[in-house]
Image (tube, rainbow, N blue to C red):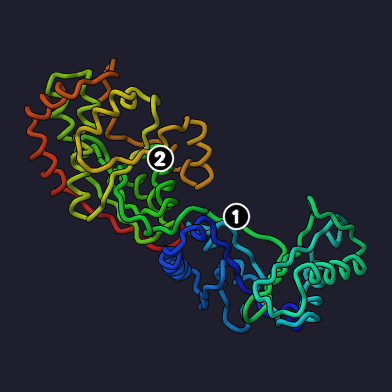
Amino acid sequence: MTMSALGEPCVLLKLGEIVLKGKNRELFERRLIGNIRDALKSVGVQVDVRRRHGVIAIFLPKGATAEQAESVAQRVADVPGLVWIHRAWRVAKDPDTVLKAGLELAGESEVAKRGGTFAVRSRRRDKRFPLSSNELDRLVGGAINDEYKLPVDLSKPDLTVFIEVDRDEVFVFTDGIPGQGGLPVGSSGRALVLMSGGIDSPVAAYRMMRRGLHVDFLHFSGIPFTTSESIYKAYALVKKLDRFQGKSRLWVVPFGKAQQSIRNSGQDRLAVIAQRRLMLKTAEEVAHRIHASALITGDALGQVSSQTLANITAQDNAVDLPILRPLVGWDKTEIMAEARRIGTLEISELPDEDCCSLLAPRRAETRAKIEDLKQIEKRLDAEELCVQLADSIQEYTICAGPP
């Protein structure tokens, strides 16, 4: 691949729903660019991130390799707010140079070597360019057809050569990496995730990151009646998720003694819901301290006894902060598929002593009454207890590096 024809490698980023934000679009784009720059600090390549009309371009230093561009592309593919990441070549705004670059790029493809169909898709953002999009398509497409004898297929081509004429240069590329979509993390505020070691809560956290929330994580450990295994597991999950937002924080509550008090209250069938309410009350106290505006759980309607509609209503009654449940309409198969895609499933399936194992009644209540739960909380002095639990939390710093 000659540098004279293909110029310099770069990365072109396509935006999703941000383009629909009207007068607020600039705020979202500024947040997204900040997130991109933060994410690329771990790559070790000095980059220049520039906003263009409808796209963001990442320029690498002079002499950068295609491998470095690939590393940049793979890293920003985890940044919510982007729908496509293209490893592109930056060439001069000259029809002859664009023609040579398109020919060369097509010639390096497997389709040119093994056979198949192709198409050329041009977009002219700078209308001062002497050729229209259709004229560019015909010019480059005709040359590729003559050179490599490939048939044109405009419906489902095996190879597509993209040409985008911008303000100062032309971008030429053939493929892309799907992005995370959604909104830039931080554009919707901050929330606190009740993070178990299971499959659901990490997926719930990810889904809310995609909606623009920066999330912190609160894990309830059964210590002193369980080992630290669940903490290690929660840490591993948060580290895996951190690549989507950065600067994640994990808070751990030693919850074993509080669970023991609930078990000793004598309300066996209500114990699980009483525990969930106390967790939410504690989470609300922590959320106020770290300035989070909502709580997030991995509840899915009807999945277990604590997630019936009546029991979810009883849990909502425990706190004033909104409780976000992004998985409420998902089934377990869908949740597991998403966990596998984002890389948390393997960690979630590791064995550990979860704090919930300390409260496992033979038969749990599926229609808990709020007044009965309040009576338990009155005996426990739940309002004071949740403050004590919040006072006892320990913060675990998420170390930067590969998840």
The picture quadrant where one finds residue 64 is bottom right
Residue 326 shows which numbered tag?
A: 2
Residue 277 lies left or right of residue 152; in this view the side is left
Kind of residue indicated by mark 1 = Pro
User: Considering depth in this image, is 227 or 4 the residue closer to the camera?
Assistant: 4
Image height of 251 relative to 161, above or below: above
- In which quadrant of the rendered image does the C terminus lie? bottom left
Name the element at disc 2. loop
Give me the residue at 89% from left, 60% from top.
150
Q: Residue at x 46, y 69 (%)?
A: 33
Q: Is residue 138 above or below residue 222?
A: below
| Disc 1 element | strand
User: Which residue position is annotated with label 1?
Assistant: 178
Residue 68 image position (x, y, % from top left): 60, 72
Q: Position of residue 300 (x, y in %)?
A: 40, 31
User: In the rendered view, does 145 fall on the left or right side of 85?
Assistant: right
Q: Tell me which corner region of the image, top left, top right, bottom left or bottom right, holds residue 143.
A: bottom right
Q: From what the image shows, is residue 276 above or below residue 371?
A: below
Ranked by sequence position, the earlier of labels 1 and 2 is 1
The residues bearing labels 1 and 2 have C-alpha atoms spaced at a distance of 22 Å
Residue 364, located in which quarter of the rendered image? Answer: top left
